[in-house]
Image: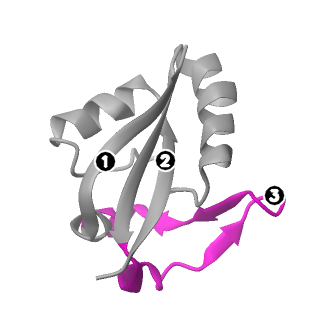
Amino acid sequence: MTTTTLWRPCGPVELKLVEDSAWTAWPPRLPEQPIFYPVLNEDYAIRIARDWNVKHSGAGYVTRFAVDTAFLERYPVQQAGGSTILELWVPAEELPEFNRHIVGPIEVVHEFH
């Protein structure tokens, strides 16, 4: 199986929920969060964690995880700004299926305070 590496910037509350899943799944979205946004490059994730999550929750984390590439083909890459600001937009109702296609653990690779 071929996998694609994705990154997800998050705050401490979301990270605790991932830890509670034994590092295997992203938590359900809140009602005001209709989309789950993993990103396609580490630098973009770092900027969000450092510049947004720290400001709003006191800490920011960058996670890295792999997903079955064939499964990801259903989600077109979204350019949310400059050429390196690339995301996948996973509808909240599809997150349980997305989680089933994560290969290996979700890892914390950067932490900011």
> Between residues 40 and 80, which one lies in front from this camera angle?
40
Question: Magenta residues, as a range?
Answer: 68-96
Label 3 with label 2: CB-CB less than 8 Å:
no
Q: Residues within 10 Å of mark 1 (few under 14, many from 20)?
A: many
Magenta stretch: includes residue 98 = no
Magenta stretch: includes residue 69 = yes
Q: Residue 108: give x, y in percent of width and height.
A: 39, 36
> Can see residue 34?
no
Residue hosting label 3:
81
Mark 3 residue type: Gly
Residue hosting label 2:
8
Task: Name the secondary structure under disc 2.
Answer: strand
Q: Any mark on residue 106, and which?
A: 1
User: How is this picture coloured?
Assistant: one colour
Q: Residue 41 sits in which quadrant?
A: bottom right
Q: Residue at x 55, y 13 (%)?
A: 113
Q: Residue at x 26, y 64 (%)?
A: 103
Q: Is residue 59 left or right of residue 45?
A: left
Label 2 with label 1: CB-CB less than 8 Å:
yes
Q: Residue at x 43, y 78 (%)?
A: 72
Q: Earlier in the sequence, mark 2 or mark 1?
A: 2
| Distance of label 3 from label 1 (alpha carbons) | 26 Å
Q: Is residue 23 left or right of residue 48?
A: left
Does residue 101 lie above or below 18 as drawn? below
